[in-house]
Amino acid sequence: MFIGEFDILLMSLFKNRGQVTELDSPDDAFNRKGTFTLIVVNNEFATKEFLKSLAYGYPTSPIVVSAEGEQRKDGYIARYVRFDEVADNQISFEEKLARSDISVRLIREVHRHAKKLLILVHNQPDPDAIASAMALRTLLRRNKKTATIGYLGEEISRPENVAMVELMGINLQVISHNDIKNFDSIALVDVQPSYFRGEITNVDSVIDHHPVTPECDAKFTEISSEEGATATIMTRLLRAAQVEISAKLSTALLYGIKADTMILNRGADLDDLEAFTYLYNQADLGLLRKIESKNLYSEEIKHYGQALSRHWINDGIIFMNLGRIEKEHLISQVADMGMKVEGVNWSVAFGVVSGSHVVMSVRNSGSVKSAGRLLFELFDEIGSAGGHRSYAKAVIPMQEVRQLIGKTSRKNIEQWIDRVFRTATAQSA
C-alpha cells in the first residue's frame, strides 16, 4: 500500500512485484481491510501520530517512509528509505529490513521492563554466539550493568575465542544455575531452550540460526536456519533499527560470520554474503587478524598427533580419535581438518572430555544427508545432539555409553562409533 504521491518509476518497480494499492489521503488508509506486505508512506504524511496509528491498525505490516535524506527519529516506528537511491534488486532487501523492524519493536517490548537482563549463550561460546550477544545488548540499548552476557560452563579455552574476548575487552561471564534467579528476564542467543534440557525455563526471547527444535517456547523468537550465522540475523536487526554499528561490534560480527561459515564456504546464503560485505567495510581488520592468528596452543599439538595416529577411513568416512582430552574445541578443529582428505564425504572426530562425556564433531560435504539431523536421530535420546546440514555435534554422558556398549575401552568406543555412523550414512545414501 502506497500513501501519497510517488515517482512513476518506483511505482512501476513495485507493480512488477505484485498488486499495489495507491491512496492519495492518509485518512483512506484506515478504511482498508487485510494485511499488506509493505506500507510505504510519503514523507509529507509521516507524522509520529499517523505512523503510530498506522502501526496499530496494521500490526503485522512493515512501514517504510520514502524520504530524502531523513533519518529515523527516536520513537518512530517506521524505516526511512531514500527510494531514489534504491535500485530494483535492492527493494526486496529493504522490504526485509522493514519486516525486521517489526521484530526489533517486539523484542524491545519483551525486555523493556527488565531491570537485570541475562543474555545467555551456549556452554561453549564461539565467535558467533559472543558477537551476537554483544549485538543484542546494543539493539536493546543496554550496557554491562543492565545486561549480562553469560554462559553455563567452564572458562573458554579455544585460543582464538580467548583472544577475541581479551583483545576486544568483552565482559563474558561464567554463571551458575543458581545465578539464574538473580535475573528477571532471559534472552537466548545462538541457542534454543531444548539445549539446556529443561534446566533453563521462563525464556523471554530466542534468536538463533540453528534448525528450530521442540519446546522452543518464548515470548519472542527469531529463528532462521537459512542463515549461516546468528551474527547475520543480528546484523539485519541492527540495520533495520538503523542503529550505528561501531567498528568493534562490526569486527565481532564479521568474525562470527567468518567462523561459523568458514569464510562463506559452509552453510552460507545470500544474507550472509550481504552482511559480510556490509560489516567488512567498517570492521577493524587489523584487530581481526590479531584474533585469528591465535588458533593453537603449543601443548595442544600432541592431540593432533594422537588424532592422526588413531584415524581410519571406511566407506568415505574418516574417523579420528583424540582420546582423553580436557579442551573440547580441539575435536571440532580436527573434524574440520578431516574434510580436507581426498575421497572423504564425512569426517567424524571424537574424544572423551574430562572423563565424563564422549563428544563428537561431524562434518560433511553438504551434498549428503544433514549432519545435524543425523546426529539428532542417533543420539538425542541419550545426550545432546544437533547442528546444521554440513556440521554438527553430539555430547553423550559416559554412563549412557556404558549402558550401550559395556566396557568403555578405546577399542569398544571406536568400534561403536564406526558401526553407528557407517550404518546410518549407508541408510541415508
Image (cartoon, rainbow, N blue to C red):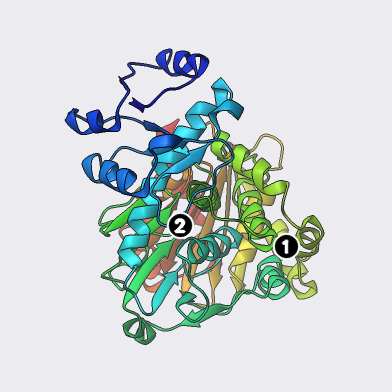
Question: Could you say which is closer to the camera, residue 176 or residue 63?
Answer: 63
Say if residue 225 shows up in the picture. no
Q: Is residue 86 left or right of residue 412?
A: right
Q: How many marks?
A: 2
Disc 2 versus disc 1: distance between alpha carbons?
53 Å
| Image location (x, y in percent) of residue 158 | 66, 69
| Image location (x, y in percent) of residue 76 | 40, 51
Q: Is residue 398 above or below residue 98?
A: below
Secondary element under disc 1, as helix, strand or loop, is: helix
Q: What is the crowding at mark 2: few (fewer than 14 residues within 10 Å), some, or many (at least 20)? A: few
Tell me which residue sits at (76%, 66%) in the image: 296
Tell me which residue sits at (32%, 16%) in the image: 19
Q: Which mark is residue 239?
A: none
Q: Is residue 419 above or below residue 86?
A: below
| Image location (x, y in percent) of residue 292 | 76, 60
Tell me which residue sits at (73%, 46%) in the image: 281
Which residue is label 1 attached to?
Answer: 304
Tell me which residue sits at (35%, 87%) in the image: 178
Say if residue 11 shows up in the picture. yes
> Which quadrant of the figure has residue 315?
top right
Secondary element under disc 2, as helix, strand or loop, is: loop
Q: Quadrant of the N terminus?
A: top left
Which residue is label 2 attached to?
Answer: 74
